[in-house]
Amino acid sequence: MSVLAQLSGITVLWPGMLWLLAAVPLLVFAYVWLLARRRRAHARLAGFSHLSATGAARARFLRHVPPLLFLVGLCALIVAVSRPQALVSLPSMHNSVILAIDTSGSMRATDVKPNRLDAAQSAARAFVENRQRHTRIGIVSIAGNASVVQPPTDNREDLLKAIERLQLQRGTALGSGIYISLATLLPDAGIDVEKLLYGWSSRFPRHWGGDGRRIEDRKPVPPGSNRSVAIVLLSDGENNHGPDPLDAAKLAAEHGVRIYTVGIGSPEGITLGFSGWSMRVRLDDSTLKRIAETTHGEYYAATSAPELTKIYENWSARVVVERKRATEVTAFFVGFGALLLVISALGSIVWYNRVL
């Protein structure tokens, strides 16, 4: 790992070379000493000067410009020798994004017009329309269980058709939705969905992942560190089936996958009637917030259809500028320093017929 030193917000790979800057004060001292010596020598000829006061002041000022440019250029070249780096924002390159959409019965609520599911579908269509190039999108439906409605693809028509196929069902299993989404995004990670959902597995033992490492030898990565994939979970937050969604969020965090949660509905909710029964369905954002926090994602609240669509449009545009990388800028300092040295030499020749 490279040793980094901090220099005015810029990191350098070879900080030891910065000791060369210690020679700069010596050069300044030598220049001041030479000026004092010349001033004493010219004092004898002061009576012969025909320059006006304004002309003399201007001459004194111009006299110092070439040495000053030379000094700044020399400092820039010394910094260049230390190999400076600057932190540059780069596209995060989310190669695949899963839209996990709650299709439970509570999504019939009309506190978000025309109802929560229709608003979610409109927002999902807006997300597809505004997707970044090379981003593949998958659709997962979440009700009493979860299923992949559309595997990740960059085909716009297939995605829009998948969104239209979403239908209301009973129950809400957010944990199942996260597990299914995670396994779809990371097919080579060895995620045993059957075991996670039902406690048993019909798989034959599998020891090797697509990255060439043994699955059991893999170690958890920092939460949010996987910038190539992401999950966008839209729900009213009420979970009543399947595994604990927070356990599922922890597994996503161990794989570095961020989950961006969107809560749809109003805190006061609305009363729904069905087969002689009635129940009040409210936005329960506590679980959604904890899912986002666990995975280093973000939580958004949408209380209206236009607000929900705006969230999806803004997210698709904003999420691509997340990753920062240290980029070497040595060439910039070399060019800047060389330019100042050339200007310094030319100025000295023009004004004094000599180089400095």
Image (tube, helix red, strand yellow):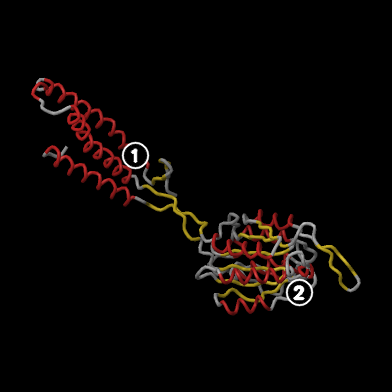
Q: Identify residue for label 2.
A: 168
Distance from the alpha carbon under mark 1 to that under mark 2: 66 Å
Taking depth in this image into account, of 329 and 158 the one nearest to the observer is: 158
Query: Up-down: is 209 above or below 321?
Result: below
Q: Amino acid at mark 2?
A: Leu
Q: Residue furthest right?
A: 276
Taking depth in this image into account, of 346 and 102 the one nearest to the observer is: 346
Q: Identify residue for label 1.
A: 18
Question: Residue, x 16% and y 24% (percent of image)?
Answer: 39
Q: Earlier in the sequence, mark 1 or mark 2?
A: 1
Q: Quadrant of the C terminus?
A: top left
Task: For mark 2, give the secondary structure.
Answer: loop
Q: Amino acid at mark 1?
A: Leu
| Residue 127, picture quadrant | bottom right
Q: How far from the left and from the top, in percent, is residue 29? A: 25, 28
Q: How far from the left and from the top, in percent, is residue 188? A: 58, 69
| Residue 205, picture quadrant | bottom right
